[in-house]
Amino acid sequence: MNEYLMAVVGGILIGLSALILLLFNGRIAGISGIAWRSWQSSVEQKWQWLFIIGLLLGTWLAHSQLNITVPQLPDNNVGWIVLAGFLVGFGAKLGSGCTSGHGICGIGRLSKRSFIATSIFMSTGILSVFLSHFI
Amino acid sequence: MLQFKTSIVGLSSGVLFGLGLAVSGMTDTQKVKGFLDVFGNWDITLAFVMASALLITIPSFYFIQKRKAPLCNLEFSVPKNNKTDNKLIFGAALFGIGWGMVGWCPGPAIASLVYLDLTVVYFLLAMFVGMAIANKV
């Protein structure tokens, strides 16, 4: 399948995932929020853990059953990986959301905060990749 | 019973999300970095992921939010805050920098656990430490 078509099909699947979570559970499919809350003790914990298990299952199914090529993993040193992971976690929690929560669901709700957050993290993401060419 | 239903929905929603991430190429860090490499060798493919996802969420969320309650839960829980504060701006800015450094955001990073590589584990541990510290700020 053509990579643009795969991107569109994948995006539709992600959109449908967010749709059913809001329609049935009344919750936003923001992965950083779901992952964070799955560690907190609450009555919500159960579906959040199952969402994470489903996320792994879906990814595994795509590669094992649909023959999607397994991507190459990043080859950066551990320090770089840890710093990036820290910034992603710290930033997502402080900014109340990540690519899915703000970019897909927040903009989906036409939230002004999410438009702003998405514009900012896309811009600094572009800047980060640009600057990393010089390192 | 309520918890059983929301659990089934959570699992199904997660499976769709994981399929979507892997099929679209979002778990491929080279591709993500290519998408953010606007001033270099720009790969626009992943813009189609967001565009098609929004094509589903924008119209459907409009109608879903007109309902009094969700189908399997007592109430909707969506962010009510509509103020742009420094936390949002600063948080989003740092998030983007980290995202561009490796090409993983939280969803694809968690999904990448299935690739059974320690790099993913290091990234996720650091991510949760970052979240725990931000939670105290």
Image (cartoon, coloured by chain):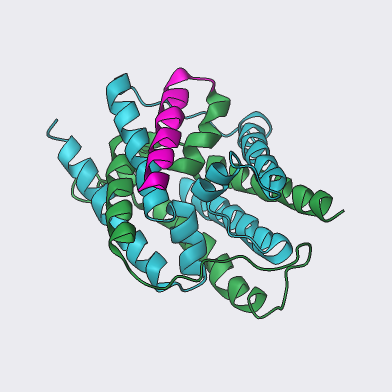
Per the image, is A116 magenta? no
Q: Provide residue A121's location: percent of width, then percent of height.
A: 31, 54
Q: Nearer the viewer, residue B55 or B69?
A: B69
Q: Nearer the viewer, residue A26 or A135?
A: A26
Question: Furthest residue to the bottom?
Answer: B66
In cyan, which chain? A
**Residue drawn at the location 19% of the way across and 36% of the way down:** A132
Q: Is residue B89 left or right of residue B45?
A: left
**Residue drawn at the location 55% of the way across and 35% of the way down:** B111
Q: Provide residue B135's location: percent of width, then percent of height.
A: 42, 46
Q: Provide residue B10's location: percent of width, then percent of height.
A: 70, 49
On screen, residue B104 above or below B3: above
**Residue drawn at the location 63% of the way across and 76% of the way down:** B65
Where residue A66 sits, quadrant-wise, is top right
Q: Main secondary structure of the magenta part?
A: helix
How many numbered discs, if any? 0
Where residue B90 sits, quadrant-wise, is bottom left
**Residue drawn at the location 54% of the way across and 71% of the way down:** B58
Q: Provide residue B127's location: percent of width, then percent of height.
A: 42, 35
Magenta span of residues? B116-137
In green, which chain? B
Per the image, is B135 magenta? yes
Question: Furthest residue to the left?
Answer: A134
- Answer yes or no: is residue A6 visible: no
